[in-house]
Image (cartoon, helix red, strand yellow):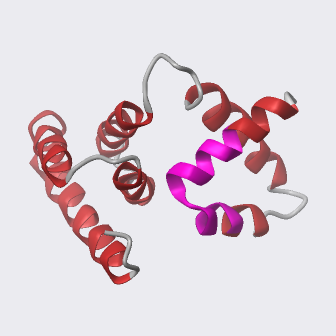
Amino acid sequence: MDEALRKKGEGVRRHVLGEDYVDRAMGAADAFSKPLQDMLNEYCWGMAWTDDGLDLRQRSLLNLGMLAASNRMHEFGLHFRGAVRNGLTDRELQAALVQIAVYCGVPAGVEAFRVARAVRAEMAGEGAI
């Protein structure tokens, strides 16, 4: 394991998903699931999210499309929150979700908007938007 890359990835993960989410995910890990948390921090967040070829906003948009296309709506909700935290505007997010509906199918777009509205309501209740 590349400890420096794992730490760098965990930092990006905390920035995008929030301290509370990452603390809960890592705190809930036991001896059996800790290797997954380490892999997520090093490989997913360290290798993919710290590369300077794309900025965080671009990565968020890509993730929303891929997660909607693969019907991973729980993860879509997490990354929608992250997209807001990464500075994507309501207009940009609306346009992305309409494009998801066109290219992934209307049911995927309807579900993406449903999840996005729920996340926005949660974030508004938290004072995050």
The answer to whether residue 121 is above or below residue 35 is: below
Prevailing SS of the magenta stretch: helix
Q: Toward the viewer: 5 or 104? A: 5
Q: Toward the viewer: 29 or 21? A: 21
Q: Toward the viewer: 65 or 54? A: 54
User: Where are the magenta residues, as a range?
Assistant: 9-23
- Does residue 16 show up magenta in the picture? yes
Q: Residue at x 55, y 32 (%)?
A: 49
Q: Position of residue 70 (x, y in %)?
A: 36, 41
Q: Toward the viewer: 95 or 106? A: 95
Q: Quadrant of the C terminus?
A: bottom left
The answer to whether residue 95 is above or below residue 4 is: below
Q: Position of residue 14 (x, y in %)?
A: 61, 53
Q: Residue at x 18, y 41 (%)?
A: 96
Query: In the current view of this chain or complex, which residue is farthest to the bottom?
Result: 125
Query: In this view of the protein, can residue 68 be seen by the observer?
Result: yes
Q: Residue at x 60, y 47 (%)?
A: 13
- Does residue 124 show up magenta in the picture? no
- The answer to whether residue 93 is left or right of residue 57 is left
Q: Residue at x 76, y 30 (%)?
A: 5
Q: Quadrant of the N terminus?
A: top right
Q: Quadrant of residue 92?
A: top left
- The answer to whether residue 79 is left or right of residue 6 is left
- The answer to whether residue 52 is left or right of residue 72 is right
Q: Quadrant of residue 24?
A: bottom right
